[in-house]
Image (cartoon, rainbow, N blue to C red):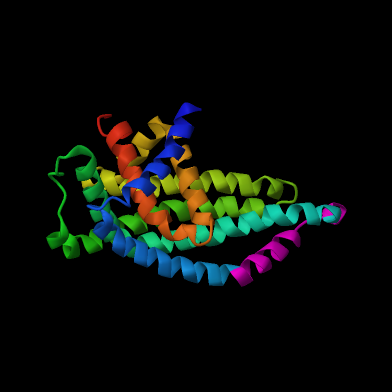
Amino acid sequence: MNDAVKGFGYLREGIRLMRQPGLRRYVAMPLLISTLVFSAAIWFGIHWIGVLVEWLLGYLPGWLEWLSYLLWPLFALTGLLVVFYTFSIITNLIAAPFNGLLAEAVELHLTGRPIDEASGWQELLKDVIPSILSELRKLRYFALRAAPLAVLFLIPGVNLAAPFIWGLFSAWMLAIEYADYPMANHLLHFTEQKQRLRQRRLLSYGFGSGSLLLTMIPVVNFIAMPASVAGATAMWVREFRETG
């Protein structure tokens, strides 16, 4: 379990890194985008999480109705996972080019060596379309797996375990999401990125769980994206960069 704890710890390092004077300017745009989108998520969630919880409780069989008061917090957690993870996808789709630039700056800060394949501000516009296409590729990967998992919420009895399964899936997806930025700066394709993360699965789940926790806490989730990008870059430098 040391890997899981270590992965979680990279979120704390990400928060520390994003406050470094030389990196603050790269954090500004992702932070602004994150603040705007997650403000919308909080507004959206205030109403729709309650609606989602009542919908999920409606699928309980009659003989389990007495459990509704115990299950309400569990299903409310499910609502938070669904709403904030969905908005996290939107946030990363919009901020993808800036996140790549932040990952490049963090790696330079940590290693003192520029990335040969990286671009810099002057090439940012050229990277917009490839970055968005990369996000859409991850979105397709997510959708193909999220749809079957969503069915679990409709199966009486099984739906009690569905929030935990969804949480593990969300942690894995967030690890993929944020590790993509430093890995893509080194021209690693999506398939190879997943292979490297699977080699250190507990480390990846630990990191993704920390990112998910930040994402689910209102107001704190404003910093979730830049902290996760910075933390994933530190994890890449120290855990993945030299593995093949």
Q: Is residue 49 above or below residue 78?
A: below
Quarter of the image holding residue 194? top left
- From the viewer's perspective, tell me whether residue 6 is left or right of residue 69: left
Q: Is residue 94 above or below residue 166?
A: below
Position of residue 171 measured from the top left corner of the image (x, y, whole percent)? 49, 45
The image quadrant of residue 42 is bottom right
Farthest residue, direction top: 2
Q: x, y (%) of residue 21?
A: 25, 53
| Residue at the image point whose x is 25% and y is 47% from the top | 106
User: Which of 169/36 is in front?
Assistant: 36
Left or right, 223 with respect to 104, comes to right
The dominant secondary structure in magenta is helix
Nearest to the observer: residue 214 or residue 100? 214
Q: Nearer the viewer, residue 87 or 27?
A: 27
- The x, y position of residue 82, in whole percent, is 56, 58
Residue 89 appears at what percent x and percent y?
43, 59
Residue at image point 53% right, 61% down:
218
Q: Residue at x 39, y 55 (%)?
A: 225
* Residue under the image location 27 percent in, 36 percent down: 237
Residue 187 shows up from this direction: no
Q: Which image quadrant: the C terminus?
A: top left
- Highlighted range, magenta: 46-64
Towards the viewer: 4 or 62 = 4
In the rendered image, residue 48 lying in the magenta stretch gets the answer yes
The reply, left or right, for residue 147 in relation to residue 106 is: right
Query: Across the whole image, how many numbered discs are drawn on residues?
Result: 0
Residue 44 found in image quarter: bottom right
Q: Is residue 44 visible?
A: yes
